[in-house]
């Protein structure tokens, strides 16, 4: 397996497409993976990303939201309730919006490495 193969699988996962062929969709619902690709028949339902995708989502968003909240606090000096009203819903919307993409990335990465998510330590 080459670096190019892994990057291609990750890229396809980011587009929510089958990591093997790049044609079929990987979800039948929000983040529920299909059992197999409807274009090439590759089995995908056995790949369990579990906490990998939420962890990646938090890492990505944290790098943007923490500095933004800090800058907002330093520049505007809003009361605490403004932070709660602004950042609470924003974080929820961004997490829910980004999660299908990060799960696709994780699924593509795990598929490229031949992992299923149930490997023993």
Image: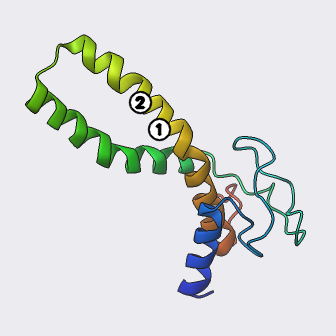
Q: Is label 1 in a helix, a strand or a loop?
A: helix
- Indicate whether 91 appears above or below 103: above
Mark 1 Cα-neighbour bin, 10 Å: few <14, some 14–19, many ≥20? some
Q: Is label 2 in a helix, a strand or a loop?
A: helix
Q: Is residue 62 left or right of residue 35?
A: left
| Numbered circle sitting on residue 9 | none
- Indicate whether 84 appears above or below 28: above
Q: Is residue 38 left or right of residue 77?
A: right
Q: Position of residue 71 (x, y in %)?
A: 15, 37
Foreground: 103 or 75?
75
Q: Position of residue 36 (x, y in %)?
A: 87, 60
- Indicate whether 113 appears above or below 46: below
Which quarter of the image is occupied by the N terminus?
bottom right
The residue positioned 68% from the left and 66% from the top of the image is: 115
| Numbered circle sitting on residue 94 | 1
| Numbered circle sitting on residue 90 | 2
Residue 121 appears in the rendering: no
Q: CA distance from mark 1 to mark 2?
A: 6 Å
The residue positioned 63% from the left and 46% from the top of the image is: 50
**C-beta proximity under 8 Å, tags 1 and 2:** yes
Residue 93 appears in the rendering: yes
Residue 62 location, quadrant: top left
Q: Position of residue 108 (x, y in %)?
A: 64, 66
Q: Is residue 75 left or right of residue 121?
A: left
The residue positioned 70% from the left and 55% from the top of the image is: 118
């Amino acid at each position: 397996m080459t670096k190019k193969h892994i990057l291609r699988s990750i890229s396809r996962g980011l587009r929510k497409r089958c990591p093997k062929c790049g044609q079929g969709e990987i979800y039948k619902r929000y983040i529920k993976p299909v059992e197999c690709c409807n274009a090439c028949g590759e089995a995908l339902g056995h790949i369990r990303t579990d906490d990998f995708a939420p962890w990646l989502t938090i890492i990505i968003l944290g790098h943007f939201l923490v500095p933004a909240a800090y800058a907002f606090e330093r520049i505007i000096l809003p009361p605490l309730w403004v932070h709660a009203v602004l950042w609470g819903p924003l974080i929820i919307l961004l997490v829910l919006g980004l999660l299908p993409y990060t799960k696709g990335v994780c699924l593509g990465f795990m598929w490229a490495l031949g992992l299923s998510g149930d490997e023993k330590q």
